[in-house]
Image (cartoon, rainbow, N blue to C red):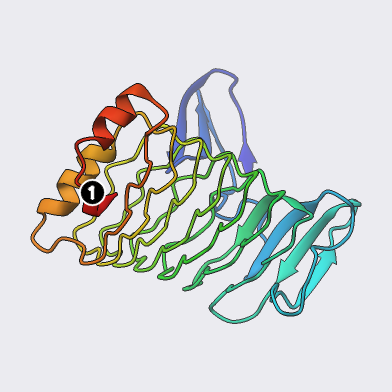
Amino acid sequence: MSLQLGKTKIKEVYFGSIKIAQMYLGSTRVFEAVDPYNPLNLPPNTVRVRTNDGNPPIKDEDKASYESATLVSGTTDTYDVYKSGSALWALLWGSTNVVEVIAANTTGIVSMAYMFKDCSSLTTIPLFDTSKVKYLSSMFYGCRSLVSVPLFDTSNVTDMDYMFTFCESLKDIPLFDTSKVTNMEASFLSCSNITAVPLLNTSNVTFMKRAFAGCNKVQSGALALYKQASTQATPPSEHDYAFRTCGQDTTTGAAELAQIPDDWK
């Protein structure tokens, strides 16, 4: 609905990050609210992707678990991928022709484990609803072309083991909420281009083996995370190789690595 009698804009009204109204002298223009998690208004359990060859996402019967892939009208390379239920487990596992996730409606999903595993051509991922998700194990494992990820809501996640293993192009790791995470094993193993280790909450982490092993270009953060994890009320019981070679290729990273005990690296 729009009502505009004046031309001098005096105020904009927002709901979160979405502009829902502009106020003018003598009038107000109201915009329809848009869900920031689902800006394209996709149906439930649907992920819109683009492929590099125009074909549907590659589906190996032993890997990718999606039930349908529908070509989006007016496009030649964009598909709406669907899977029923409350888990998108292995949705696009091994779909090496997927280069972009455009949008998704993932409201209510509790598991995204293996969702994009081995999508080696995937470069772009948007923010989508992860507020109910508990399991992110191997979600982006082997996404070697993925450059960045948004700050997902991980407030209910318990398992993020192998989540970003072999994400060799990833530059930065957001400061995810890991307050409920118990399993962080190999979460960032061989993320060889990240330059900093974020101070993630490890208060409930039991498994931290190889968490940042092979992150050779790290310049800072490893020592602070080690100090936090090793001195918390209940330190991770399994932390072998948590920081193996982490930072060894940089001056400051190597200096931090030298201060971490051998049983952590």
Crowd class of label 1 (few under 14; some 14 to 19; many from 20; radius 10 Å): few
User: Is 53 situated above or below 131?
Assistant: above
User: Is 78 situated above or below 56?
Assistant: above
| Residue at the image point whose x is 15% and y is 53% from the top | 230
Q: Position of residue 207 (x, y in %)?
A: 30, 65
| Badge 1 amino acid | Asp
User: Is 235 situated above or below 51?
Assistant: below
| Residue at the image point whose x is 10% and y is 52% from the top | 231
Front residue of 74/190: it is: 190
| Residue at the image point whose x is 74% and y is 62% from the top | 95
| Residue at the image point whose x is 58% and y is 39% from the top | 169
Q: Position of residue 28 (x, y in %)?
A: 53, 34
Q: Secondary structure at mark 1?
A: helix
Looking at the image, residue 184 sits to the left or right of residue 225; the answer is right
Q: Which residue is mark 1?
A: 262
Q: Position of residue 244 (x, y in %)?
A: 35, 47
Q: Quadrant of residue 42?
A: bottom right
Q: Quadrant of residue 170?
A: top right
Q: Position of residue 114 (x, y in %)?
A: 57, 68
Front residue of 243/141: it is: 243
Q: Residue furthest top?
A: 8
Q: Quadrant of residue 263?
A: bottom left
Q: Residue furthest front?
A: 262
Q: Is residue 140 visible?
A: yes
User: Is 243 situated above or below 118?
Assistant: above
Numbered disc total: 1
Looking at the image, residue 157 sits to the left or right of residue 26; the answer is left
Front residue of 4/110: it is: 110
Q: Is residue 201 visible?
A: no
